[in-house]
Image (cartoon, grey):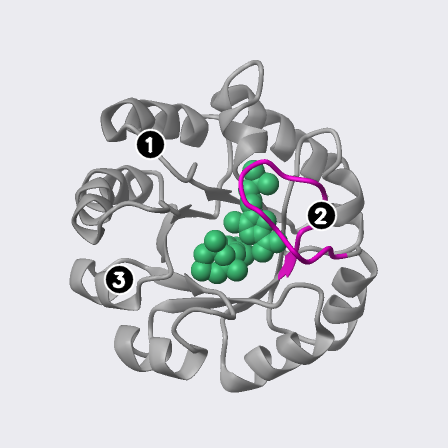
Amino acid sequence: MADTRLYLISPPRIDTEAFAAQLTEALEGGDVASFQLRLKGIPDVDIERAARVLMPICHKYDVAFLINDNPKLVRRLKADGVHVGQGDTPYAAAREIVGPDAIVGVTCHNSRHLAMEAGEAGADYVAFGAFFPTNTKDVSHQADREILSWWTELFEVPCVAIGGITVENCRELIEAGADFIAVSGGVWNHPDGPREAVRQFNQIIQEV
Ligand SMILES: Cc1ncc(COP(=O)(O)OP(=O)(O)O)c(N)n1
Ligand SMILES: Cc1nc(C(=O)O)sc1CCOP(=O)(O)O
Ligand SMILES: [Mg+2]
């Protein structure tokens, strides 16, 4: 069985009440390490409102609750961590805001240089992507699985694979050594629902 674990990413827009039910279903489907609230193009006050509903659900299932892009909100809500991209608050400033105990993850696209920089600076994980075409985000970088095996052979800092990951295509990333597979559409748009999607991802992880 591989050590890979699932990292769920929210859809970019949600109806919080309806999504709370979907999230609960997903978390009942099997092991999930973490959840990232990634809401785009809506006011911070609405992100905060959603976080206040969704964070207790994640904690009930022992799932770390991270927020995308916004370290100040992470500090205010005492969330578990923040994810920052190359155009967001830089790692050092994000760390300063959230403190030493929170998780800080950094987007590294397909760049060994960015990943080594983030790892040396103290990032809790480095994220590579996009591995596959995705409808969730306009992406301008494509990653290949060799970067996962290269990273895991050389470094202790965990690596996350993201971008268009589904139950159909995840196996090669797990085999390449991804510590986490970060999935949005592959769970929320699964034809048999989020619970079944999480079950199937975990089944594949067990088989590798
Ligand atoms: C786990 C994970 N990896 C990568 C990203 C992308 O972050 P970023 O490049 O800042 O793009 P946005 O998500 O902010 O659109 C992520 N959110 N999570
Ligand atoms: C948020 C995000 N970041 C990416 C990157 O490559 O950095 S790809 C991506 C979208 C993830 O959603 P899905 O699983 O539906 O493709
Ligand atoms: Mg970002």
The residue at 28%/39% (across/down) is 60
Q: Is residue 117 left or right of residue 173?
A: left
Residue bearing the label numbered 2: 2
The residue at 34%/69% (across/down) is 102
Q: Regarding mark 1 in the picture, which secondary structure is present there?
A: loop
Q: As shown in the figure, which amino acid type bears the numbered disc 1?
A: Ile
- Mark 1: few, some, or many residues within 10 Å (few <14, many ≥20)? some
Badge 3 vs badge 2, beta-carbon distance below 8 Å = no
Between disc 1 and disc 2, whose residue precedes?
Answer: 2
Q: Position of residue 136 (x, y in %)?
A: 54, 39
Label 1 CB less than 8 angstroms from ligand 2: no
Residue bearing the label numbered 3: 74
Q: Regarding mark 2 in the picture, which secondary structure is present there?
A: loop
Label 2 CB less than 8 angstroms from ligand 1: no
Would you place residue 87 above or below residue 68 in this image? below
Q: Regarding mark 3 in the picture, which secondary structure is present there?
A: helix
Q: Is residue 78 left or right of residue 185?
A: left
Residue bearing the label numbered 1: 14
For the N terminus, give its image quadrant: top right
Q: Is residue 120 visible?
A: yes
Q: Position of residue 150 (x, y in %)?
A: 80, 69
Q: As shown in the figure, which amino acid type bears the numbered disc 2?
A: Ala
- Mark 3: few, some, or many residues within 10 Å (few <14, many ≥20)? many
Q: As shown in the figure, which amino acid type bears the numbered disc 3?
A: Val
Going by the picture, which residue comes out furthest to the top?
192
Stretch of the chain drawn in magenta: 128-143
